[in-house]
Amino acid sequence: MQHNKVLILDFGSQYTQLIARRVRELNIYCEIHPFNKIPSDSDSFKAVILSGSPNSVRGEDVLHPNLEGFRGKKPMLAVCYGAQYLAHFSGGEVAESNTREYGRANLSFVKQDEDFFENIHEGSQVWMSHSDTIKQLPTKGVLLASTSDVENAAYKIEGEETYAIQFHPEVYHSTDGHQLLSNFLIKIAKVEQDWTPQSFVEETVDNLKEQLGNDKVVLGLSGGVDSSVAAMLLHKAIGKNLYCIFVNNGLLRKNEFEDVLHQYEGMGLNVKGVDASARFLDALKGLSDPELKRKAIGSAFIDVFDEEANLIQDVKWLAQGTIYPDVIESVSATGGPSATIKSHHNVGGLPDYMKLKVVEPLRALFKDEVRRVGASMNMDKQLLGRHPFPGPGLAIRILGDLTAEKVRILQEVDAIFINNLRSWNLYDKVWQAGAMLLPVNSVGVMGDERTYEKCVALRAVESTDGMTADWVNLPYEFLQKTSNEIINKVKGVNRVVYDISSKPPATIEWE
């Protein structure tokens, strides 16, 4: 089935992925491509969206897209930088704003009887994020909306289906952003809403059958959402020819190896559990640097996985749970708006000597879509609702060097924290939670004795995609009970703190 497609040209905005997710929420398929790498099949896209950018159209580093194939030929929505680009290079004027226009604003004027603003009224809250502003509209520009500080907040170009806005409809704070995108894509561009979890499953399973035939495929399961959903799609397509390997690196949560293996058995998957925990701990001995720890874990995993894969006769393919944000970041605009914060993405992680072809059933999906696809296959809600867990596991939640004793301590602490979140019905309100073991000993008192033991930090954040995150305001009573339980039950810990940092500037993990 050929979907109606929407093209998003990325100029490096931190919000570009969010635009794509909002479009997908309308059951419309879209793809993100760098502004300077327009795909060769550009005719197949039914509408185009230009993203924002940290760059200025007035500076020396102007990002010039080639819009020849789109401008005036296809419906186009230009957001922020895109809107300023169209104005600046089409007879209008963009100047530095007197004040940086950032944050919430309200529409003070909306042009009546415009499809683009249907069901959006004066007073509607929008989110601004720019330091330049459009002083004069481009040739044939028609004003559609203003705020008290920004006169040219939205405009269209007469004779074209080209619309432009200086605010961000994709962010949560633009209360009618969903309506605006819907007006543009469905009412104006007439894109069909045919991108659904069910259609994805049917098409993917058919494609996998065709791609893989009777070949054998090996997949490394992690117990997480992505690898589990990828496994189910492959299982539907090739059944017994899928060989799953679940490696215990000794850095999983308490009892997770046994619990997850049991869960997979109930799903009908062909899974082999490999306990290599001693091997991983040995590879990590004496390492304190987070990058070195990651590399040691990655290297040990590849060795274990390669040994196990070689035990399967005639395996041809390696399946990975790569998802769309990984793919976007590996081909992003101008070498990437996203700097490499840490190295453990799936993309490009296969060593040459394994000589396996790669199959990635989820590479078109965002995390929330992966969950919806899993739900449409009736997968276990608890598995689909699992918090993200870092690939290197507890190794990057134990700051400094690792020992078996430190892993034991953190597993016990983490189990109390996560179990309490579940029993207080807080687990599903949190995007990710975990505990960090700090390389700090502090003085405490237990009974009549002084102690000099470890400090642990609890972390719980809310987010949609992990790119930004806010700390969760957990009830004091919950924190009090959890802290007491950890200190009373976990030998070696005498102090508990709660991390109230947001991302940015802090990251979700501590290493």
Image (cartoon, rainbow, N blue to C red):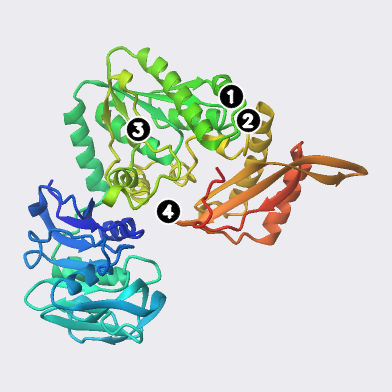
Find numbered disc 4 in the image and state the secondary structure of the residue it sits on. loop
Q: How many C-alpha atoms fall within 10 Å of the one at disc 2: few (<14), some, or many (≥20)?
A: many
| Circle 3 or circle 1, nearest the eye | 1
Label 2 – label 1 distance at C-alpha:
7 Å
Q: Along the line of sight, which residue is nearer the eye, 285 or 1?
A: 285
| Circle 2 or circle 3, nearest the eye | 2
Name the amino acid, label 2.
Leu
Q: Which residue in the protein does label 2 denote?
A: 402
Q: Is residue 454 left or right of residue 382?
A: right
Looking at the image, tell me whether mark 2 or mark 1 is earlier in sequence order.
1
Q: Position of residue 138 (x, y in %)?
A: 15, 78
Q: Which residue in the protein does label 1 denote?
A: 281
Label 4 – label 3 distance at C-alpha:
26 Å
Looking at the image, tell me whether mark 2 or mark 3 is earlier in sequence order.
3
Q: Which residue in the protein does label 3 denote?
A: 231
Q: Position of residue 364 (x, y in %)?
A: 26, 45
Q: Which residue in the protein does label 4 denote?
A: 467
Q: How many C-alpha atoms fall within 10 Å of the one at disc 3: few (<14), some, or many (≥20)?
A: many
